[in-house]
Amino acid sequence: MTSRSYPIAFYVSIGVALVAIITLYLGFDIKPSTQRVVEQSRLNQFESTNINTLFDEALPQLDESTRIYLQNLERSLQPNDSLNIETYKQLSSTWFDQDNYGIAGYYAQKVAEIESTAGSWGIAGTTFAHGLKETDPKMRDFCVNRALKAFEQAISLDPGEVSYRINRALVYTEVPPPDNPMKGVLELRDLEKQFPENTGVLTALGRLAVKTGQFERAKERFEQVLAINPEANGIYCLLVDVYNNLGEADKAAQANLKCIN
């Protein structure tokens, strides 16, 4: 098994946040493990599945060596939860490598509950947020609900860190509340008013504009990012598609060169 280290910061936008949500990707020290763990969170009463069901479904799909490794990690857990941080990180990282973001997020949440820091709750949120694209509705709901709660915890502990609010808004844009389908977009626009030069907010709005075919608006947002931070080379990669859709082939070619370099 390879080894990773705990994530240090998710990219601040599901575009950069399913790159924020997606990019503070896990770097726990890795190694596998699992045995059933009883989840006592109050979230259970609102979820269409629970952690034990996720384990029951996931364990048979693991190869034998990974399953044994996870089981050994579970057996090493101590009665005092605070002694288990590194083991929880290894469990989270291993499940993340298995593309099981619900269980990976569950263990990242265990770390956050012990450490009680905005950063650890942000990592839990971004880990769960990888599950937004799950095709299984039970797993997707599990991940969405917990991602939102994790980001809310992070915001309450560090209200000044804008990335947590960006990522929460991006969750809402990916899975809009039925009674408020514009919630995520409105939150991002509100953040833009408060932080007009925040490149994470501008990038998130640019990506949403691309998604809805508003290429002129996307161009404006992305070019704003480059005016603020000319070193943001990843934005050139996004602009290639935008310029092509606007018929600006020369600009697309130039952006492509900067994207590659």
Image (cartoon, rainbow, N blue to C red):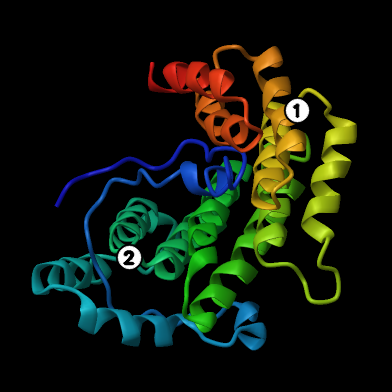
Task: Give the label on residue 220, or none.
Answer: 1
Q: Is residue 51 left or right of residue 126?
A: left
Could you tell me if residue 161 is visible in this image? no
Q: What residue is rendered at 45% in x and 69% in y?
A: 102
Q: What residue is rendered at 40% in x and 63% in y?
A: 104
User: N-terminal of the two: label 1 or label 2?
Assistant: 2
- The correct choice, above or below, for 2 with respect to 202 in the image is below
Quadrant assignment for the C terminus: top left
- Residue ID for mark 2: 78
Depth-wise, is mark 1 or mark 2 nearer the camera?
1
Q: What residue is rendered at 33% in x and 40% in y?
A: 5
**Residue 105 place in picture, x, y as percent:** 47, 62
Secondary structure at numbered mark 2: loop
Secondary structure at numbered mark 1: helix
Q: Is residue 52 left or right of residue 3?
A: right
Mark 2, Cα crowd under 10 Å, few <14 / some 14-19 / many 20+, is few
Q: Nearer the viewer, residue 21 or 93?
A: 21
Count of marks placed on residues: 2
